[in-house]
Image (tube, grey):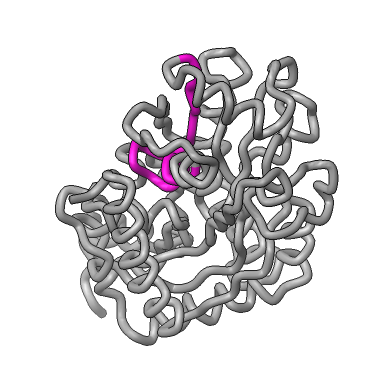
Amino acid sequence: MKNWTCAAIAALMMSAALPAVAEECIAPANPGGGWDFTCRQIGQIMTELGIVPNLVQVTNLAGAGGGVAFTQVVSNRGDDPALFVAASSATTTRLAQNAFAGATADQVRWVGSIGGDPGVIVVAKDSPFQTLGDLVEAVKADPSKVAFAGGSAVGGFDHLKVLMMLDKAGFTEARQVKYIGLDGGADAITQTVGGFAQAMTGDLSEITGFIKSGDVRPIAVLSDERVAGFDDAPTAKEQGVDITAMNWRGIYVPKDITDEQYQKWVDTLKQVGESEQWKAVMVENGLEPYDLYGAEFETFVAENIAEIQEISKEIGLLQ
């Protein structure tokens, strides 16, 4: 009979007691924003569909407009098959502008997107601005008196949305626009409700609750048509500003997982995206269909980064 030492027996008992490694989603921002929304909704539906036996752990890792999370995944968790990270147009914007200290898109693997989040500009419920035109005219009169808060860093997608909107409205002095970059949409809403910013630029899903509670008023949705469920919110286009800004929502995973593990994530995300649960989430939060998976999504990401680089050069944010 094999002799067992006390240490070996203790080690065996400890390993038997450990649970299986649970899936984890990193939201690269504070709780309450769009990335946090992506992690929690996907994770909850994965559990409801029986894809995972337990709740998915959500880790909020804010900083550098998603750069802190991206760097940690690349540097420390490059082969973790249980990890996925919430991503959006804000992620590719920062990569396009080389804002992640030299990091590049090919340092991770892009799984897919399952929804498009229309951009929106909101003001506090007691704001004097009733229309997008009111806000634009105030910026033109004195840009130093109108600050926009957003849930991404300076130069990020929320910032770009404001600059592109104002450019379309005839204000071309991008460097004069006041923008407060924060770690998530919830923080940006707080700044706006508190009067520290005159308007907030974000995505519809991350501020749906604040709109429904009446804390803020949407004065422009940056979509082609009014969004179902938010019929009272006018588009920028119908107010004479020809801009559409759709923020895709999806995930990426560490680069050094196996092809089989990567494909499993693609299949998982597709299953979530096709579920009745996700369709209900989309309706409730003003999301629109935006389904891209696997190789098709990786091609889209590369093209998206090239497009944002061109836009950033045009408005002076990138040389």
Is 100 on the left-hand or right-hand side of 279? left
Task: Give 148 or 51, whichever is nearer the viewer.
Answer: 148
* Residue 14 at least partly seen: no
Is 24 on the left-hand or right-hand side of 227? left
Q: Position of residue 276 (x, y in %)?
A: 78, 70
Task: Give 159 or 310, whichever is nearer the viewer.
Answer: 310
Q: Quadrant of residue 80?
A: bottom left
State yes or no: residue 205 in magenta.
no
Q: Quadrant of residue 304?
A: bottom left
Task: Give 204 or 294, whichever is nearer the viewer.
Answer: 204
**Residue at x 28%, y 56% (from the top left corner):** 95
Q: Position of residue 282 (x, y in %)?
A: 72, 59
**Residue at x 38%, y 41% (from the top left corner):** 61
Residue span colored magenta: 145-161
* Residue 303 at least partly seen: yes
Q: Quadrant of the N terminus?
A: bottom left
State the count of labels: 0
Is 15 on the left-hand or right-hand side of 208? left
**Residue at x 57%, y 37% (from the top left corner):** 32
- In the image, residue 56 sits, relative to residue 126, either above or below, namely below
**Residue at x 53%, y 61% (from the top left corner):** 248
Q: Position of residue 167 (x, y in %)?
A: 46, 43
Q: Quadrant of residue 268?
A: bottom right
- In the image, residue 267 sits, relative to residue 169, either above or below, namely below
State yes or no: residue 159 in magenta.
yes
Q: Position of residue 275 (x, y in %)?
A: 72, 73
- In the image, residue 301 sits, relative to residue 284, either above or below, namely below
- In the image, residue 251 sits, relative to residue 312, either above or below, namely below
